[in-house]
Image: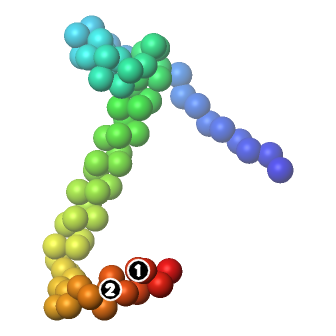
Amino acid sequence: MYRIVYRMKVTAIIDDDLVNNVKEYTGSSTITEAITIALKDWVDIYNIKELNKKISQNPVFIDNGQEIREINRSI
């Protein structure tokens, strides 16, 4: 089985303080790793916000949590 990985080389002008903060907060030793982690985190947060919007349009109400706890415990 073969796996094709697409990568993009990008030249960007980003404030040094911002890059240094991202490196520090992510614990990364390289700019590439730091920006990759930050972008993945941003996408995850965006997806969570979109999911929250969908859930708020059609919320699930639980009258009795005991039934759900029993289902969870049986799994």
SS label for mark 2: helix
Residue 2 in the image: x percent, y percent? Answer: 80, 46
Quadrant location of residue 67?
bottom left
Name the foreground residue: 72 vs 14: 72
Q: Is residue 30 above or below residue 53?
A: above
Q: Pointer 1: what residue? A: 72
Q: Residue at x 83, y 50 (%)?
A: 1
What kind of residue is marked 1? Asn
Q: Is residue 56 above or below residue 34?
A: below
What kind of residue is marked 2? Ile
Q: Residues within 10 Å of mark 2 (few under 14, many from 20)?
A: few
Q: Residue at x 23, y 57 (%)?
A: 49
Q: Residue at x 28, y 65 (%)?
A: 51
Would residue 11 be visible to someone looking at this image? no
Name the foreground residue: 62 vs 14: 62
Residue 72 in the image: x percent, y percent? Answer: 41, 80
Q: What label sits on residue 21 in the rendered view?
A: none
Q: Residues within 10 Å of mark 1 (few under 14, many from 20)?
A: few
Q: Residue at x 27, y 8 (%)?
A: 16
In the displayed structure image, the side of residue 4 where residue 41 appears, left or right: left
Name the foreground residue: 10 vs 15: 15
SS label for mark 1: helix
Q: Is residue 43 above or below residue 30?
A: below
In the displayed structure image, the side of residue 70 where residue 63 appears, left or right: left
Q: CA distance from mark 2 to mark 1?
A: 6 Å
Residues at circles 2 and 1 in contact by the CB criterion of under 8 Å: yes
